[in-house]
Image (cartoon, helix red, strand yellow):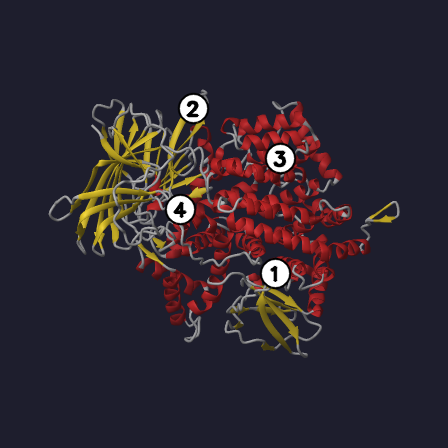
Amino acid sequence: MTTMMVLMGTTRSCVLLLMAVSATLATPATTSTPSTTSTPTVDGVGKVTLPKNLVPIHYEVRLQPFINGNFSVHGRVHVQFRVLEPTHHIVMHMADMLTHNHTTKVIEATSGQEQKILQQEYISTTMMYIVHLQEQLAHGGHYTLSLDFVGTLAEQLRGFYRSSYTKENGETSWVASTQLASAEARRVFPCFDEPALRATFKIFLAREQHMKALSNMPLLNSTPIEDQEGWMWDEFETSVPMSTYLVAFTISDYPARVVHHHDNNGTLLRVWAREAVYNKLDYGSRVGSLGLQFFQEFFGVDYPLPKLDFVCPPEMSPNAMENWGLITYRESALVYDPATSPATQKQWTCYLVAHELAHQWFGNLVTMSWWTDLWLSEGFATYMGDTAVDYIEPSWGMLDQFVVKRQQKVMALDALRSSHPVCVPIDDPADINEIFDIISYSKGASIIRMMKHFLTEATFRRGLKTYLTELKYKSAKQDDLWRYLTEAAHEDGTLPDDLTVKIIMDTWTLQMGYPVVSIARAGNSSAVITQEHFLLDRSSENDVRFPHNWWIPVTYTTQDKPDFDNIRVNFWLNGLGIQPASYIGYPQPDQWIIFNVKQTGYYRVNYDEANWELLTRQLQENHEVIHVTNRAQLIDDALNLARAGHLSYRVALGVISYLAKERHYVAWKAAFNNLQYLRDMFYRDQAFGALKDYLVSLILPVYRSVGFEERQGDDLQTQLLRGEVMTWACNLGHPDCRHNALQLFRGWMADPENFEGISANVAASVYCTAIRAGGEDEWNFAWRHSRDTGASNLADALSCTEEIWLLARYLEGAFNASSGIRRQNAANTFRSIAAGPVGNILAWDFLRSQWSRITNYIGATFFALPTMIEDVTKTFNTAQQLKELVEFDQENVGRLLTGKRAVLQAVEVTKINVDWMEKNRDLIVDWLENQGFSCHLSGIML
């Protein structure tokens, strides 16, 4: 039989049977043959979004993937849809598949009448499949489109893809799994692939008898496939209405760990992974059960599905994906071994599970109408993930850690002119991955945290419950959430009647950046308060300081009555542009004041020099009078204000002089985040030795306090602090740290069979120090053990070597499928190499010369390309590096995929760094000299 089919814009003849096991796909053509038939005009086509005239109601999808064969996927789809506006055309998304055009049918639901098809068309630039009809589809009518197609289990980690693992007997086992966010469902079956176009799904998966298929909903029944011995059809229950990007299925030979979670619905929780890690799933399972309980109580809305599966495919692009009822995780994210995993891994597993569970409500139950409001999903999942961790592991102080790990980190990026609002217009789905960044995640989470505090938790939760209940199984925009929260706030009296959540929050979501609030004493008991857009680049050139003003919830506490538990809003600094504001009630001149209690607001604070001196004195005399979160705030604000030219480095470095007495992880994390910038700027400078001696002097007291060895009874924050301190001390060449690290590693090499092991929380610094000091033998030893154990910290440490040829070999292997480095780890391997002073130059040269190869290998996947660009360029601070970066940008215009914004930001950061060196390098060298850290060599000042 001869059939016509659409293949990436090319018309071909071919015979393919839907369930032919022996069918072999030919290599798709890459050229396009123009159609000789004139194509009817279709309103809305040519844009990247679908026309608004049809909405899907229900999909029936049947797929047979030949996972143990030629990797083809044979499929059939039936799509029921409703007509909102009369049309002669059905427009859907489709990519990477062959369609059997002779099987395409359009049936009117009521009469069963088949609609005559004039032509089928595929537009590759917009990934749109169009069926042109002779008769117009009637307004309000219900129709079904059905067709057969053939696709492929992809190598790139998107759509319906394949990955494999090696069993203990040496056999290779293949796994088929999906990654349909953000717009990849079209690569699996023709569909209306936009988040607002929710529908129900009936999934049928064909599998071999020894394998197990999973989908969003529970299995309904399994039946043998006629004439295909050893094959079964698995039919799954019909889903609730959901977006295409949340559809999921896996086929594997994994065993299941069943966790009977008892909630209001009796939800069944199961965890699936390869057998070798089966006994390391307990903690992730426990967090899953406790997390479900927490979110149902917090939101007051039950989890709506009868089951929830966690699955670990051998490879994934993101760390995890919140598919409704079938969450997928990287194995490294879900597996936790109390005997060998560091505290960072336990915290990461707990958070990531909680984050994905939060999505089951924010993102799944109520979905954003379009990717413009991605931040609603990711910002809520990030903040609520940390909130759930605080419930599950209250001793960790997760909400204090939030400030230094999320808020302060994103504020560094959001201080660039090339930043973007959290609510950003997206016209092209190709740009969606651009906004899967820490602005959407961490800034979104930070302003949600701020909103919760100015509304109060009770009002916040009541508004969320109404929002989730009223919009269940629907799509929403941020204004919908503002409306429900405002109603709750006015009823509870937590906002004045003339102030709405929308008025406040639009100033935080619709414009980029954030303010610095400056307070200057104006007499004994009053002050003048102003706000301005905080930018790291304050140069007059390109000074397009937007007329930004924010509604700022102002909180404060004073020396005479220090109260860091009261975080209720004292007053509002309005967003109407009325400047300055006066504040009456300022403390006496010899008393300090701190604004932004517990840094609940997303803004920086600058004081007059007198108040900075009072705060510095308080930190030196008794730092614990000030809450640790505000100590972290003072450190971060002071050093960033100095970096941007708002504050002298003399004052900023004076603020952190108390650190010799500090023993709290949160404060030290803020310090390390900021000291890293000084280290990066000076690493290749002749004065680095003086800076290094200064940094060692800061760290030495806490190094001695926490000790190199683990102590029984240490809490998690102490373990985290020890890990950070050891990394810094060993990297700075502290003799005791280097001696301990080398002794441990060499002892391991000498007798690996009887070696007792290296404490998990210092292992990363031990590995890195030993490999940096060693040569090929140490590197090869670490490589073998990283392959045997899968230890990520050992794999990262391989990039610490200073042998350029070893780094070059490692970097080459990261983008070679036969090297043993998984495709999902390619970007992380690159980033770890780029983080080192030797590897940075190598990685930058590789990125420039191999850009096309890199993008083809890993694809346009979420954070990978942008973070690679950011990490390899963040230390650039010379005119030559800036020139190379600008040339890279110009040479790759139009080919940067998800790296476009990252390159713009890298150019801006490099310009800022060059300017910073010119303005501050000599000032800091003089300050170091005055502190006794000499920059002299044989009497010559460097």
Position of residue 472 measured from the top left corner of the image (x, y, whole percent): 31, 55
Q: Residues within 10 Å of mark 3 (few under 14, many from 20)?
A: many
> Which residue sits at x=60%, y=48%?
886
Q: Tell me if I can see residue 165 in this picture.
A: yes
Give the residue pinned by disc 3.
Answer: 799
Q: CA distance from mark 3 to mark 2?
A: 28 Å
Q: Earlier in the sequence, mark 3 or mark 4?
A: 4
Query: What amino acid type should be assigned to the residue bearing mark 1?
Result: Asn
Amino acid type indicated by mark 2: Thr
Identify the secondary structure beneath mark 4: loop
Give the class, few, some or many, for how many residues have Cα within 10 Å of label 1's Cα (few <14, many ≥20). Answer: many
Check the image and report above or below for 549 versus 474. Answer: below
| 760, 378: nearer the viewer | 378
- Check disc 4 and report the residue beneath it: 182
Q: Are marks 3 and 1 in contact (CB under 8 Å)?
A: no
Label 1, on which residue?
630
Q: Identify the residue at horizontal 64%, vertical 51% (top origin).
A: 668
Q: Secondary structure at mark 1?
A: helix
Closer mark to the observer between disc 1 and disc 2: 2
* Mark 1 or 2, nearer chain start: 2
First of labels 3, 2 by sequence position: 2
Q: For residue 444, which numbered disc appears in the image?
A: none
